[in-house]
Image (spheres, rainbow, N blue to C red):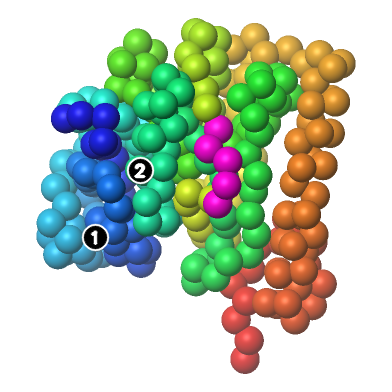
Amino acid sequence: MGSSSISCVVPTLNSAETLETTLLSLKSQRDASVEITVADSGSDDGTLEICRRFGAPVIYVEPGNMYRAINTGLSQCRSEWLAYLNSDDWLYPGSFARLIELGDSSGADVVYGNCDYADSAGRFVYSFAAATPEQLTPLFRLGRMGFAQPAAIFRRSVYQRLGGFDERYCFKADADFFIRAINAGERFALLEGPPVCCFRVHAAQLSNRKRELIEEEGKRVFSAAGMKPRAADLMTLAQWRLKNLPHYLIRIARASLLSRRLRLPRAIEDYIHR
């Protein structure tokens, strides 16, 4: 397949509630040929029926580690560009084409864009401005990832050189992958402009149910990579936060309007009124 093509793996486990939106977004991509592989770990809730309806090929991967499912799917892909998308997130039409175009024109190995965030019902809550490539390493040293994983694509050659996602990690193998890519000298490029994807934030998702375990694993990832903070990194963090200040304010206002009471940025709720 050529550079106008991309392969995307969607890991699933009882994802029927949100998977249709995810697959529809992939099927609706403009100006890019998308090879979809669903890596399922034993769903029994209608997930597989949705895949059949969308004509999305399914492979079975033993449950226990999401990144094992992703690696299994990506190892079978042959496109120049690769990505993975969680079964509760979605891409905007034309996003893959925009990312691929920048990657091809810049010669970058990893391309990423900005990201929106929505609640469990898919209602917009806030946006997130990604950091520039120059800011990524200082932010990683401070334990922060400067862009959202669903907003990124990477070359198959990079994936192969790095040996894929490290399956010793259950929650933060994506951060580990991109840190290793930076340390290996791979070229990163930021797609400025409108967000390319939407990340669904809800109380039931893994990142909220196992927050303490995820934070602990994150510390191990950054420690293993030798990412020790420097004093100048705090200035980079301040600059990035300043860039996102309008988004922080919009997030407070939007969440407060949806819930009809003041909500601080870290709040997660379904905005259901009786």
Would residue 209 be visible to someone looking at this image?
no
Classify residue 212 as left or right of residue 100: right
Instruction: Please report the residue visible at 30 percent of the width from the left and 53 percent of the height from the top.
Output: 29
In percent of width and height, residue 183 lies at 55, 10
- The residue most toward the front is 105
**Near-viewer residue (246 or 178):** 246
Instruction: Please report the residue visible at 63 percent of the width from the left and 64 percent of the height from the top.
Output: 125
Task: Say if the magenta span includes residue 248.
Answer: no
Circle 1 Cα neighbour tier, 10 Å, few/some/many (<14 / 14–19 / ≥20): many
Mark 2–mark 1 Cα distance, whole angstroms, equals 27 Å
> What residue would you read off at disc 2?
97
Q: In which quarter of the view is residue 90 placed? A: bottom left
Compared to residue 273, the image places residue 10 above or below, namely above
Query: Dividing the image into 4 quarters, which one contains the C terminus?
Result: bottom right
In the image, the segment drawn in magenta is 190-194
Instruction: Please report the residue visible at 41 percent of the width from the left and 53 percent of the height from the top.
Output: 91
